[in-house]
Amino acid sequence: MKALLSVIAPQCLAIVYRGRSDWALIACAVALVVLTVVVLYFWNTLRKTRVGVSGGSSKDLFSELCEVHELNRLERSLIAQLAATYELPQPGTLFIDPWVLDQAGAAPGPEAHRYAALRQKLFGSLE
């Protein structure tokens, strides 16, 4: 037990264990663990508040929209490719207007069926 505590808190061990009982070592180790948990809790709380507040960038918006719509990596890359092909300044506009997805799904090409499936996933049946 003394070896374990000496690894965990060497400074605490040097100060506390000058002829005192093992209870002082245990109290020091518990205090160190509690302090670590408290620091991690406040760090996590601070991190969550920063993540919750959107930075306002188009990249953040695109990521949030993809997450909300539960798009996988392939679908995300299809949307990014489509936004680049049609030179859209904001790839997030593809989540609002199905026109570009309709055009890509109707065009002949190897990815046409994937664009049609993506349009169905995002907008459903608009008929």
Image: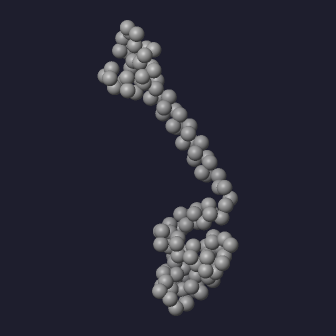
Residue 47 falls in which quadrant of the image?
A: top right
- Using the image as rendered, state which of residue 121 and residue 55 is in the foreground: 55
Q: Is residue 26 left or right of residue 111?
A: left
Residue 82: x and y, percent? 58, 78
Q: How many marks?
A: 0
Query: Which residue is located at x 40 percent, y 27 percent?
Result: 8
Task: Tell me how the rendering is colored.
Answer: one colour
Which residue is drawn at the image coordinates 37% and 23% (left, top)? 6
The image shows residue 53, relative to residue 77, as above or below, that is above
For the C terminus, which image quadrant? bottom right
- Does residue 126 show up? no
- Name the residue located 42 percent from the left edge and 22 percent from the top edge: 10
Q: Is residue 12 above or below residue 61?
A: above
Q: Give the quadrant of residue 95.
A: bottom right
Residue 52: percent from left, percent from top: 61, 52
Residue 1 in percent (x, y) is at 31, 22
Residue sticking out furthest to the top: 19
Q: Residue 88: horizontal and vertical position, in percent?
A: 66, 76
Q: Is residue 44 visible?
A: yes
Image height of 56 relative to 13, above or below: below
Question: Toward the viewer: 98 or 5?
Answer: 5
Point 60% across, 51% down: residue: 51
Residue 12 placement, left or right of 80: left
Q: Is residue 38 left or right of residue 95?
A: left
Side of 81 where 87 appears, left or right = right
